[in-house]
Image: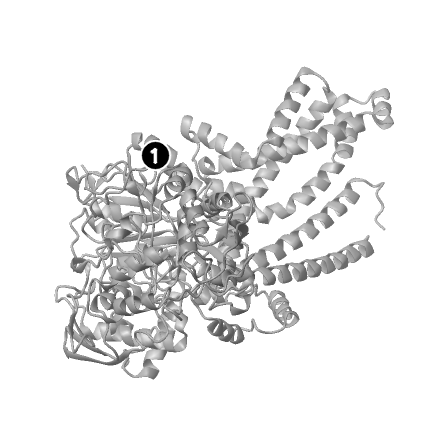
């Protein structure tokens, strides 16, 4: 999945959208996965071993940036030069991914980082901004509201809008605007749950019992149940983006402002606003979209090509210490074309495609900086715990088997061989990089390091007869500690299928290597290629129960974590975004604690347990690498954040 | 002649209907419905079922096909749930660009290849013929993307004469005027076609030169220039006419690789991106248009052939 609200993250390279096939990732939100986040502060070193690759570093960190970031590919130089006021910066759009949605209530279909992070959020800032830098944590300074205050046993949250935060027409962003937004989200969901990408059935706003406004700046929301405040702020309120009620609460272009608290009116307003959002050709001319509170406003949008231009919003309430740059977003049809533009020097900021990483030093000589970092999330091949083919369900529920499989993942080898040294290790649901405030200590070290011998020994010690190069057979059935495990009859063979997403080359490379190493341990993995959408439509149990016995493992890519990286929905029993029906009572308790207890460290315990328990086969993740001209400067964190897809040009300036 | 044309048109319609059925079924089998694109990967089976019912994707396949064809007849090629645009809008934004790129490159290819092929036939087995043949083989066997990359490296980076990308102008007039940007993509396509056409032309011209009527024309003292123009060119052109006719689908399909390499947003690229995004309404429309163009191209080639060669009787 790629990132964003509520879904699978597809992997990497293209990172076109959080829901489309090109990337291979699901993004969780709302109790499942959510968006990748970064923060103002730049993360410190992770302390992992270096990968030893040329140029790159893997998550072990070869080179380190002058900003104190290590573990990345290349470096982020310190802020330098004298700022020039004004000017234009040309930024590449991701090939084949141009904005096609502008209303801040993002639908599942339009839920892409290109609609949100680098387009919509430039004009309308989320209630709690998710990132600058690479550390996943809410950035209060860039948010239009003060930190939420909790009471009533964490069932009531009070949100106060900052008085300094104003719309571009000079009017303050008020409690009424926030309430309008929430009412419109409710109206959108009522029409279809897919109309708000962050929605998980049964969750917010379904859990909102009442909402009041004691004064012009404050909203008090009462929830049905106690929640974990950090989870609610980081994973839910980050997807609520205040909208201007005084301009948008109408049902037609020339209509008057109506009472949005009336649900019938709210539905009509949503219908009108969403219809305007579908009219791409009017984005720069529609008066609706001229009222903004973000750092930028749109001045030109070419619906045909997807090119657009933004100029600074002088009324922006957040910090904007940069050079008041005009931002020109340029579409590309392919990574090759984008790389050519970088070689020609016509781009100020762009992605360095993975296949062109070996040429990063040539670009540096041309005057570009480059920096790559893994996106916050994890790659994994998922197990199907319900597939009864060959007693697979009984095999995969054995922890020793999943541990043996983890020993066969050559993370260091993958990063060096398949990612050109630019990648981060991942041993559990919280990756080694980017470093999260919620990262447990054991997320940075591999509990099951690569070793075919260790894998073989685990199987041997549990009653399997090893046939290296062939197929292992259970020769000692039973429940004992040295036996195969319950439900595995004598003579059962270790042979199963793995369906992988062939749209991302490195997924196939990793899985082919896994099958090869597994064969040495006598595990026969039958690889089958497919594509992202086909896999998630046909080989995910809740979505396609009829196919439950057709797949033992799938590898569509991975998941993008929310700021608060709970796996609620994904790994809890019966979770709404489950993939292979993993079920563990300890995991259930820990996950439930992550979203409902007041403990800020609950999610650490959850991640720590899951890293050891291996509900999925965790894999490393390639870096997202960006280049930018060395005539462009600003706080290092605001360039590092590009690797997490956050665009903050209000901090940039051209040097004199 | 009229009966032949009408019969061919009838057959063409049947072929297009057949292609549309096959493509519709194949795409339906692969992509099912756009429900998952719209609702997102986490959508439940129940939600998808509801969406399909609301949008007619739960109907029997023949019914869905009938609705689609009815829309096509009325100028509605469907709606792209990925791009939030009617498919016709997406096609309208790009077809002229592809037409220009492929049309101009085809024109250049024909204008260069025909005299070149004749020259080679007249000077066959000479040093110049061998040289041109060698170059043609190199170009013909070269992958388009490789030739494009070489041209970009040499003429855009090493000798910065042309742009590394196709025109980004927003109007067609702007594109047509932007020769600095359009030269390399046109040259890439044209060079490959020159290699192909010139080989056919050389071979055909050599056959014609061996015919008795050429010897008679020369024997009766007709100037060589007239022999070439009146007798050789017209007769040797026949296979090229067929080739050009078959190239017509490219006029709209453009060239996926060249458009991607040169960042040129045409129809070929739209198809490629739709394939990646599984935007099956666009894929369906594009394939249907390609089918129409292919049968039209064949028809035009046959009719042109008959017009060029009175010996060919249409029956």
Residue A582 screen position, x and y as percent: 41, 64
Q: Is residue B151 left or right of residue A185?
A: right
Residue closest to the far top:
B127
Q: Quadrant of the C terminus of chain A?
A: top left
Subunit under mark 1: A
Which residue occupies the foreground of this view, B9 or A23? A23
Name which residue lies at 58% across and 55% down.
B286
The secondary structure type at the circle numbered 1 is loop
The residue that label 1 is drawn on is A53
Picture quadrant where residue A246 is located: bottom left
Q: Is residue B215 above or below residue A232?
A: above
Name which residue lies at 46% across and 55% down.
A556
Q: Is residue A293 left or right of residue B66?
A: left
Residue B180 screen position, x and y as percent: 45, 35
Residue A79 screen position, x and y as percent: 17, 40
Picture quadrant where residue B194 is located: top right
Residue A492 screen position, x and y as percent: 55, 57
């Amino acid at each position: 999945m790629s990132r964003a609200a509520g879904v699978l993250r597809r992997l990497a390279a293209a990172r076109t959208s959080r829901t489309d096939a090109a990337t291979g990732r699901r993004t969780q939100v709302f109790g499942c996965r959510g968006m990748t986040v970064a923060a103002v502060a730049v993360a410190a070193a992770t302390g992992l071993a270096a990968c030893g690759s040329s140029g790159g570093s893997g998550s072990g960190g070869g080179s380190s940036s002058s900003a104190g970031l290590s573990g990345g590919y290349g470096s982020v130089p310190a802020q330098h030069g004298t700022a020039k006021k004004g000017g234009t910066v040309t930024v590449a759009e991701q090939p084949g991914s141009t904005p096609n949605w502008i209303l801040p209530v993002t639908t599942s279909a339009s839920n892409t980082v290109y609609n949100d992070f680098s387009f919509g959020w430039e004009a309308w800032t989320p209630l709690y901004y998710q990132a600058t830098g690479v550390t996943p944590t809410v950035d209060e300074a860039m948010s239009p509201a003060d930190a939420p205050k909790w009471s009533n046993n964490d069932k009531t949250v009070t949100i106060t809008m900052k008085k300094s935060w104003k719309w571009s027409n000079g009017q303050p962003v008020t409690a009424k605007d926030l309430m309008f937004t929430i009412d419109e989200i409710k109206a959108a969901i009522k029409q279809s749950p897919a109309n708000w990408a962050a929605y998980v059935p049964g969750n917010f706003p379904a859990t909102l019992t009442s909402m009041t406004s004691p004064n012009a700046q404050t909203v008090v929301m009462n929830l049905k149940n106690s929640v974990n405040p950090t989870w609610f702020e980081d994973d839910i309120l980050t997807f609520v983006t205040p909208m201007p009620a005084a301009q948008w609460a109408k049902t037609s272009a020339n209509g008057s402002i109506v009472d949005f608290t009336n649900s019938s009116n709210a539905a009509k307003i949503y219908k009108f606003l969403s219809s305007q959002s579908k009219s791409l050709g009017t984005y720069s001319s529609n008066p609706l979209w001229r009222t903004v509170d973000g750092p930028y406003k749109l001045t030109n949008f070419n619906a045909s090509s997807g090119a657009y231009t933004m100029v600074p919003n002088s009324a922006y309430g957040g910090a904007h210490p940069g050079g008041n740059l005009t931002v020109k977003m340029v579409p590309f049809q392919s990574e090759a074309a984008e790389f050519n533009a970088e070689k020609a020097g016509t781009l100020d900021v762009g992605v360095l495609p993975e296949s062109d990483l070996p040429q990063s030093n040539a670009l540096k000589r041309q005057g570009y900086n480059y920096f790559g970092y893994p996106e916050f999330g994890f790659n994994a091949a998922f197990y199907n715990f319900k597939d009864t083919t060959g007693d697979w369900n009984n095999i995969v529920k054995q922890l020793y088997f999943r541990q043996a499989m983890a020993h066969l993942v050559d993370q260091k080898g993958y990063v060096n061989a398949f990612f050109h040294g630019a990648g981060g290790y991942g041993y559990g649901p919280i990756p080694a990089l980017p470093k999260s405030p919620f990262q447990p200590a054991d997320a940075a070290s591999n509990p099951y390091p690569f070793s075919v011998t260790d894998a073989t020994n685990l199987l041997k010690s549990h009653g399997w007869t090893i046939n290296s190069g062939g197929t292992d057979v259970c020769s000692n059935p039973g429940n004992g500690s040295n036996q195969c495990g319950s439900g595995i009859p004598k003579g059962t063979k270790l042979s199963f299928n793995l369906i992988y997403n062939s749209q991302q080359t490195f997924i196939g490379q990793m899985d082919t290597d896994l099958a090869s190493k597994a064969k040495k341990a006598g595990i026969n993995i039958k690889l089958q290629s497919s594509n992202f959408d086909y896999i998630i439509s046909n080989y995910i149990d809740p979505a396609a129960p009829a196919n439950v016995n057709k797949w033992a493992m799938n590898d569509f890519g991975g998941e993008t974590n929310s700021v608060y990286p709970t796996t609620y929905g994904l790994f809890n029993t019966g979770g709404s975004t489950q993939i292979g029906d993993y079920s563990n009572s300890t995991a259930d308790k820990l996950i439930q604690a992550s979203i409902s207890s007041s403990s800020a460290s609950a999610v650490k315990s959850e991640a720590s347990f899951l890293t050891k328990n291996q509900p999925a086969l965790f894999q490393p993740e390639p870096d997202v690498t960006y280049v930018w001209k060395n005539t462009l400067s600003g706080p290092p964190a605001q360039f590092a954040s590009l690797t997490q897809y956050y665009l903050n040009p209000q901090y940039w300036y051209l040097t004199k | 002649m009229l009966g032949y044309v009408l019969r061919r048109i009838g057959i063409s319609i049947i072929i297009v209907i057949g292609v549309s059925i096959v493509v519709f079924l194949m795409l339906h089998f692969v992509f099912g419905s756009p429900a998952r694109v719209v609702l997102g990967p986490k959508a439940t089976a129940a939600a998808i079922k509801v969406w399909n019912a609301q949008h007619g994707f739960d109907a029997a396949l023949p019914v869905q096909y009938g609705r689609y064809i009815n829309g096509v007849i009325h100028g509605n090629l469907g709606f792209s749930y990925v791009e939030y645009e009617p498919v016709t809008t997406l096609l309208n934004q790009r077809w002229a660009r592809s037409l220009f790129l492929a049309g101009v490159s085809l024109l250049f290819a024909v204008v260069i290849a025909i005299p070149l092929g004749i020259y080679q036939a007249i000077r066959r087995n000479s040093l110049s013929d061998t040289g041109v043949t060698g170059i043609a083989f190199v170009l013909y066997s070269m992958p388009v993307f490789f030739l494009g990359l070489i041209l970009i490296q040499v003429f855009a980076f090493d000798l910065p004469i042309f742009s590394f990308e196709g025109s980004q102008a927003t109007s067609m007039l702007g594109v047509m005027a932007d020769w600095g940007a359009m030269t390399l993509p046109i040259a890439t396509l044209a060079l490959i076609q020159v290699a192909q056409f010139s080989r056919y032309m050389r071979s055909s011209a050599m056959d014609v030169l061996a015919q008795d009527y050429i010897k008679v024309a020369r024997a009766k003292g007709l100037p060589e220039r007239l022999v070439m123009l009146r007798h050789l060119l017209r007769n040797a052109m026949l296979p090229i006419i067929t080739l050009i006719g078959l190239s017509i689908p490219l006029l709209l399909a453009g060239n996926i690789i060249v458009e991607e390499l040169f960042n040129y947003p045409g129809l070929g690229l739209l198809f490629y991106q739709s394939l990646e995004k599984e935007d099956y309404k666009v894929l369906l429309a594009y394939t249907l248009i390609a089918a129409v163009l292919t049968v039209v191209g064949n028809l035009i080639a046959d009719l042109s052939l008959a017009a060029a060669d009175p010996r060919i009787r249409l029956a």
